Image (tube, rainbow, N blue to C red):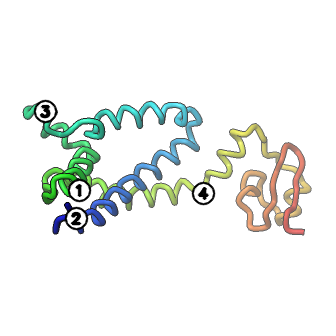
Amino acid sequence: DLTIYTFLFAPLFVLQVSMITAIVLILSIWNVRYRDVRYGLPFIIQCWMYASPVVYPLSLVPEKWRTLYLLNPMAGLINSYRLILLQGQPPKLIEILPAIIFAFIGLPLSYFYFKKAEKSFADIIWLNAGWQPTADSRCQSVVNGCSAVSCLRSESAVILKGARCINLKN
């Protein structure tokens, strides 16, 4: 049965999306900078799932470990979903407090960190793909004397591929 507390599902969902967005922004930066991160992510996500009460209720966690366990922001969120949807009870603020703190601090910080790091993504991806920028005079003349690496970010849409320079604006 749906109860009066069912309307709290939407704010919990927004909280969860905010928290996950913060995590995804950070992990995307790491994935661009450190190419092997993508291989470790499935393992980390699986460990995080087992460290959260997805397949078992929070009541199975011993009382002496529960406070430490609830520092995992997903543990409180998942238990709150259970309380609202399955038991018709309100969520406990103390359980979702780590998720609230993480979302309100982590999302703005990760967003600004992402925007700062985003400027170098093209250069990093370009170099990781094996293409070496060169100081080709044809490229410099196309983009008004910019250096080879900054040609990657130039507004004239110049791409360096090996020693060849292609102007996409024509």
Type of amino acid under label 3:
Trp
Type of amino acid under label 1:
Leu
**In this view, the mark in front (1 or 3):** 1
| Quarter the C terminus occupies | bottom right
Type of amino acid under label 2:
Thr
Q: Earlier in the sequence, mark 1 or mark 4?
A: 1
The residue carrying mark 2 is 6
**In this view, the mark in front (1 or 4):** 1
Local secondary structure at mark 3: helix
The residue carrying mark 3 is 65
User: Label 1 to label 4, Cα distance in Å?
Assistant: 43 Å
Residue 141, quarter of the rendered image: bottom right
Q: Is residue 55 above or below residue 106?
A: above
Q: Residue at x 29, y 46 (%)?
A: 74
Q: Residue at x 29, y 53 (%)?
A: 102
Type of amino acid under label 4:
Lys
User: Label 2 to label 3, Cα distance in Å?
Assistant: 29 Å
Local secondary structure at mark 1: helix
Q: Are the residues flagged by discs 2 and 1 in contact, CB closer than 8 Å?
A: yes
Q: Is 15 positioned to the left or the right of 146 in the image?
A: left
